[in-house]
């Protein structure tokens, strides 16, 4: 796993990251596993900074940014194309800035001697064997929104930097500061479309060098990236095509490859083993990640695609995926709650009519789901959820049939022991009391949380690609500048029911980059069939994994009866809480890996190394 770490303190430190490489010009900062070409630093006098990862700034741009560091204009250091971590020093102040989507997270812990920071929470926990924070893991399972507990991490005493914030360390200690606005100024879709196109084109271009290039070729998002990459040279485009899926991804992929020069198309056929939950009999074959990761559930499918890519290439290359395209190019209908709150009655009704037609429902039913969320803010919604956690667990109901909520309570919350639910409720009440700078709109909050969740999971997928084949996974829709460009368009325009992904259409229509028949597409593939096939085929293993000997059960985070009932329904092909099952399986696998992994995070050094 690639990670970075650093120390700030007056008395020095007695350990170093195992196998770490010092960051040039920044004392007491190291990278582990990162190629030298992905670690670049500049400095002059008391000002220095480094970018780690895929950063589109050239050496001159980095050098020219030193005056910005001197005046502590931190946000400007996050505006280059790509996805990267920034470490900056201005005099005695040290700043560590992750990205907006959580692919480069920042964690820290302090004691009397100083502060350790890292992009790996597990590494900081390993400093003294810090245990799991049960309430934080409960929040992860119950809500699925990373920023609900703000700076509270999954390990006791290891704090996290929430999205849009940076870590600032100085002589007075460590503090977290916001660098990204809670909400972006609204820009009309048509006006912003060229900005979105330019941001995406730049995000793709800056990742293409002399390595082989491959892409997923399936839905609108991955197809757009494939077309952009093909403008710069040969691309091996792969489509996972399993007859159980019964979608039209393959038909569109074949037509796209026949239309767009430089796209060589390859099909990855499905197999008995390419279903959800395959491979959980031997957890040692899954790479260790820093947090529970959803891709352990779909690892067999991802490995089939990556294996094909590796066979096609002469050397490890870069593979583009459309992950997070849905989150930035469209918006869920929950934005209707914002329209109701703002008393935009006519627009609310027009959009409700459109969404009702899509769902074969009535506009009154659509608005009824959104009305409760329109009558409260984020803090109030959390207090309501806390009250619900103190009541008996609910019978399962599909999330689409429950009222829209700022922070939906997932079915996994109903599988927890009552004592854990009560503690989680207390924690949520505390979070509501400490909340500052809350977003005014539900769409702004939920959109950022969706991105943070997808970004964290994509980081795990990246670990899988690197571990198995040395392939670099690229997810341009998760880049800072792409996120900013897309989310500046109001949710009611990105998610308008009359057109499918209107922002993408406006950005690339008549551009000659993406074929018109792709932009006119209104269908989307899904993996439900493979999810239920995996639940059916691997039900015995899942019941064993989440049964009485489960590590989650030992912590009170699942109880055997409700989980067994959910698995029984799924094995019979009946509707069930698939998303909740994915979450708890990923968390269970992660807890077993933590206990079994022989990861050496640190090495001791003789004496104490003097800190800068």
Image (cartoon, rainbow, N blue to C red):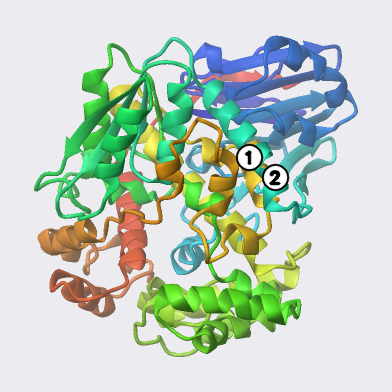
For residue 94, above or below residue 431: above
Quarter occupied by the N terminus: top left
The answer to whether the residues at label 2 and label 1 have Cβ atoms under 8 Å apart is yes
Which label was assigned to residue 457? none
- In three-dimensional space, the C-alpha distance between marks 2 and 1, rounded to whole angstroms, equals 6 Å
Where's residue 262, x and y in %? 36, 19
Tell me the number on the disc at residue 196.
1
Which residue appears farthest toward the right when viewing the image? Answer: 71
Q: Position of residue 544 (x, y in %)?
A: 16, 63
**Quadrant in which the C terminus appears:** top right
Quadrant location of residue 571? Answer: bottom left
Q: Is residue 105 visible?
A: no
What residue do we see at 55% from left, 60% from top?
A: 331
Report which quarter residue 5 is drawn in. top right
What numbered label is drawn on residue 192?
Answer: 2
Q: Nearer the viewer, residue 435 or 574?
A: 574
């Amino acid at each position: 796993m690639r990670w970075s770490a650093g120390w700030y303190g007056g008395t020095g430190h007695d350990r170093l990251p195992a196998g770490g490489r010092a960051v040039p010009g920044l004392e007491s900062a190291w990278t582990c596993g990162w190629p030298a070409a992905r670690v670049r630093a500049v400095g002059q006098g008391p000002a220095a900074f480094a970018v780690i990862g895929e950063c589109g700034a050239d050496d001159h741009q980095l050098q020219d940014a030193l005056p910005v560091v001197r005046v502590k204009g931190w946000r400007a250091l996050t505006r280059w194309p790509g996805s990267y971590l920034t470490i900056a020093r201005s005099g005695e102040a040290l700043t560590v800035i992750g990205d907006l989507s959580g692919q480069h997270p920042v964690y820290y812990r302090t004691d009397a001697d100083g502060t350790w920071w890292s992009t790996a929470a597990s590494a900081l926990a390993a400093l003294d064997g810090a245990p799991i924070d049960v309430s934080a893991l409960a929040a992860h399972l119950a809500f699925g929104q990373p920023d609900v507990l703000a700076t509270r991490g999954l390990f006791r005493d290891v704090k996290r930097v929430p999205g849009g914030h940076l870590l600032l360390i100085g002589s007075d200690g460590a503090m977290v500061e916001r660098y990204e606005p809670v909400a972006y100024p609204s820009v009309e879709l048509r006006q912003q479309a060229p900005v979105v196109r330019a941001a995406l084109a730049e995000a793709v271009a800056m990742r293409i060098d002399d390595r082989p290039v491959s892409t997923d070729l399936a839905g609108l998002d991955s197809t757009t990236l494939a077309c952009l990459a093909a403008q710069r040279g040969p691309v091996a485009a792969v489509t996972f095509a399993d007859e159980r899926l019964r979608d039209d991804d393959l038909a569109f992929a074949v037509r796209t490859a026949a239309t767009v020069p430089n796209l060589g198309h390859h099909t990855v056929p499905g197999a008995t083993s390419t279903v959800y939950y395959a491979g959980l009999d031997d957890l040692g074959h899954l790479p260790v990640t820093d947090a529970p990761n959803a891709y352990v559930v779909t690892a067999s499918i991802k490995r089939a695609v990556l294996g094909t890519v590796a066979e096609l290439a002469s050397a490890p290359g870069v593979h583009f995926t459309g992950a997070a395209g849905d989150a930035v190019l469209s918006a869920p209908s929950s934005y209707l709650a914002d329209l109701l709150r703002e008393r935009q009655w006519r627009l609310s009704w027009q959009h409700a009519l459109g969404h009702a037609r899509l769902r074969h429902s009535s506009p009154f039913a659509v608005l009824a789901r959104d009305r409760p969320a329109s009558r409260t803010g984020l803090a109030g919604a959390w207090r309501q959820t806390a009250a619900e956690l103190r009541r008996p667990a609910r019978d399962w109901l599909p999330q689409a049939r429950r009222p829209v909520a700022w922070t939906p309570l997932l079915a996994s919350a109903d599988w927890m022991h009552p004592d854990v639910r009560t503690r989680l409720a207390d924690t949520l009440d505390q979070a509501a009391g400490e909340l500052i700078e809350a977003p005014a709109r539900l769409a702004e909050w939920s959109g950022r949380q969706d991105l943070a969740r997808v970004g964290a999971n994509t980081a795990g997928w990246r670990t899988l690609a690197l571990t198995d084949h040395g392939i670099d996974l690229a997810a341009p829709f998760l880049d800072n500048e792409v996120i900013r460009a897309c989310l500046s368009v109001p949710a009611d325009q990105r998610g308008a029911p009359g057109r499918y992904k209107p922002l993408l259409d406006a950005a690339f229509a008549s551009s000659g980059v993406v074929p018109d028949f792709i932009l006119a597409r209104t269908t989307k593939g899904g993996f439900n069939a493979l999810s239920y096939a995996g639940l059916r085929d691997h039900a015995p293993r899942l019941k064993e994994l989440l049964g009485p000997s489960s590590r989650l059960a030992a912590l009170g985070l699942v109880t055997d009866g409700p989980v067994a009932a959910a698995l029984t329904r799924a094995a019979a092909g009946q509707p069930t809480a698939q998303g909740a099952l994915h979450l708890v399986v990923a968390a269970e696998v992660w807890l077993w890996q933590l206990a079994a992994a022989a990861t050496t995070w640190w090495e001791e050094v003789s004496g104490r190394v003097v800190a800068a």
